[in-house]
Amino acid sequence: MIRYIFLAVLALLAGCRDDSTTAMPPPVPINDDSTVAYFCHMLLINMPGPKAQVILEGVDEPLFFGQVRDGVAYMKQPERTAPILAFYVNDMARAKSWQQPGRNNWTNGKKAFYVVGADVKGGMGAPELAPFARREDAEAFAREKGGKVVSFDDIPDDAVFGAVEYPDMDPAMQMDTGSKSSMDKGPDNMTAPPIKTMPAGNKKGN
């Protein structure tokens, strides 16, 4: 009897550990009037294509990205402002269209499936990754637009890093994403805006 009680307690403790490691703060909907991209400071609602958001520990607002490739690049870079609590991307299967990707159709970016190399452009006019919550939706998109379906961990670096030519932007203003460390700078090569931190004991997800 004692042995069975001991095993039951171990199972309960294991379940508690699983809950603590999988808990994530929820995504934040895009606000039509105030949500801007972290790098270019443009209103997201005015930009086509899927978006991304990164929630950091001790930071009062998510970092929103006008293109999914920029959000993935931030996730892949070695330098971090703070520990990452969550990463979300638009599930394009639930979007009205590429031009209207949605305000609150977020899915876990680490578990999403991405179409790499499709014939699509993101909000800044650069080649874009198309994210989906389900593999079958990503595969259907790839059959229509080209490209291949990969998981987050299999996204190649050259799909998110490297110089990007924006057709409607002055060459002097091109975004430098030639290295992972350059992701701390915006498209005008100026340091990204400072991140506001929350008071101790009032962190997201706690």
Image (cartoon, helix red, strand yellow):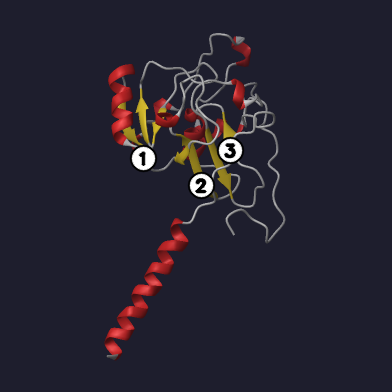
Q: What kind of element bears circle 3?
A: loop
Residue 16, position in %: x, y? 43, 68
Q: Is residue 63 left or right of residue 121?
A: right
Residue under label 2, please give it.
86
Distance between the alpha carbons at the discs numbered 1 and 3: 25 Å
Which of label 1 and label 3 is nearer to you? 3
Which residue: 41% across, 43% down? Answer: 110
> Residue beneath label 3, please?
29
Q: In percent of the image, x 49 and y 23: which residue is there?
A: 49
104 or 125: nearer the viewer: 104
Of badges 1 and 2, the one in the foreground is 2
First reached walking from the N terminus: tag 1 or tag 3: 3
Q: Residue 6, position in %: x, y?
A: 33, 84
Depth check: 205 or 182 in front?
205
Placement of 86 over or under 22, stated as above or below = above
Q: What amino acid is found at the position of numbered circle 1 in the picture? A: Asp
Label 1 and label 2: CA atoms lie apart by 15 Å
Relative to 193, does residue 13 appear above or below in the rendering?
A: below
Q: How many residues crowd mark 3 within 10 Å: few (<14), some (14–19), many (20+)?
A: few
Image x and y of residue 64, in percent: 59, 34
Q: Nearer the observer, disc 2 or disc 3?
A: 3
Q: Relative to 81, is 138 above or below?
A: above
Q: Residue at x 69, y 49 (%)?
A: 197
Say which residue appears at 63% left-offset and 15% top-offset: 173
Q: Could you say whether the residue bearing mark 1 is in a helix, strand or loop?
A: helix
Q: Nearer the viewer, residue 80 or 85?
A: 85
Q: CA distance from mark 2 to mark 3?
A: 14 Å
* Amino acid on which disc 3 is placed: Pro
